[in-house]
Amino acid sequence: MKIVIYNINSFGGNYEYAKALFDTTQKWGKIERCSLLVPTISPLADGPNLCKILMSDKPGMSNRVLRQFHFVYRSFVNPWRFYKFLKKQQPSIVVFNDFDQLSSIVWSFFFNKLRKRHLFGVILHDPDRDHYFAQKGISAYTMKKVMSIMDVAFHHGYIPTKSYYSETLRKVEIPHGIYTPAPVDAGFQSFLREQKGRDNLIGILGNIRDEKNYEIIIESLKNLPNTKLLIAGSPASSSVNTQLYREKIRQDGLEERVIWVEKFLSDNELIAAITVCDVISLYYKETFTSQSGILNLIAPFKKRVIVSNGESSLKQVVLKYQIGVLVEPGNKHAFVETAQKLLTEEQQLFDEKWTKYLNDHSWENNIKTIVKTFETLKPGS
């Protein structure tokens, strides 16, 4: 059996997921060959079956318009490169760990021609695609084109009822494996501890995107004495204007209580940030249907988490294992109360729950489920 994994980014949660899948298939020994397609600038060391053929997702220009043009351009170029790659491959299982929704109207036509040779599956890290474009109808139409080539959709516990997920589509839940923590960046950890001082620290980590409710959490600091906020990460795309958040911090007079680190965090720096935080915020807006992957970066450190009560697989996992507290989206008062409660509860209560969660997840189980599912399918069926 041959597997091809497609991942359009060289950083972020989906990239880490793709790396874990690729590494697991190499170690498992039951896959004839697994190829991973990533951008040319991927920091992964060159090796067998690692195909760095996709366009860079880090344009070398600061002009916002040019960066947006680059994003659109690579949304067309990458699927075309992938199509030409697959045309040369023997029959394979093709796993879209990410996809180019913007250009799906074009590339789905060509990929449909490959369905007689290959089996196609997609891992839905963010299954609610209604807000990919400003117009919901366009979002639904382009996502329907993405799904038109898929034989199976994999998810981590939740798929919303949407027109682009047909009733006949095979939907399979897969476990989200636990990431092996990278070594801590001692220098960055020391810096954060110095900035934190004796205060509690709430962290919003990773790609900066509007869906992470920065405004509400920044405002909540006014009602959380002896508490600071860490915002650390780089903008998720060229459309994110971080100056708006920094201006709010200034207007609210919270410059001394917000640790702002706007940069791409290396794996080592991200782990350092997690270790220093007392509470991690996964308090997303209702427009963002989050999967549960971020929990697996936090899990080894058994941190307390605040999670949005909006429908998502993240919510389902938190409910099942009781490893965090759910808060209604957009409710600042509820967020403040929850943060106050978490910061005073005994850590031992969370240690026991996190241990059960850790025991139930593995990347090998993830790959086994994917392979077992495809074994029952035939190309073109």
Image: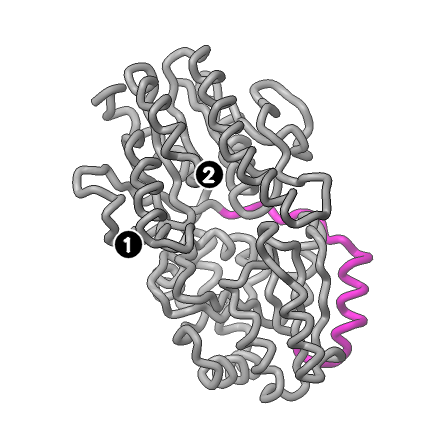
Position of the N terminus, as image quadrant, is: top left
Front residue of this view, candidates 283 and 105: 105
Label 2 belongs to which residue?
98
Residue 96 in percent (x, y) is at 42, 33
**Left or right, residue 175 beside residue 339:** left
Q: Residue at x 30, y 27 (%)?
A: 374
Residue 315 in percent (x, y) is at 38, 63
Front residue of this view, candidates 213 and 138: 138
How crowded is the residue under tag 1: few (<14 C-alpha within 10 Å), some, or many (20+)? few
Residue 313 is drawn in which quadrant? bottom left
Q: Residue at x 40, y 62 (%)?
A: 287
- Residue placed furthest toward the front: 65
Disc number placed over residue 160 in the picture, else none: 1
Numbered range of the magenta stretch: 178-200
Helix, strand or loop status at disc 1:
loop
Residue 188 in percent (x, y) is at 78, 58
Query: Does the magenta portion include 185?
Result: yes
As measured in the structure, the alpha-carbon distance from the residue carrying label 2 to the one carrying label 1 is 18 Å
- What colouring method underlies this structural image? one colour
| Amino acid type indicated by mark 1 | Pro
If you read the primary sequence from the N terminus, does the residue marked by circle 2 or circle 1 appear first?
Answer: 2
How crowded is the residue under tag 2: few (<14 C-alpha within 10 Å), some, or many (20+)? some
- Residue placed furthest toward the left: 167
Helix, strand or loop status at disc 2:
loop
Disc number placed over residue 261 in the picture, else none: none
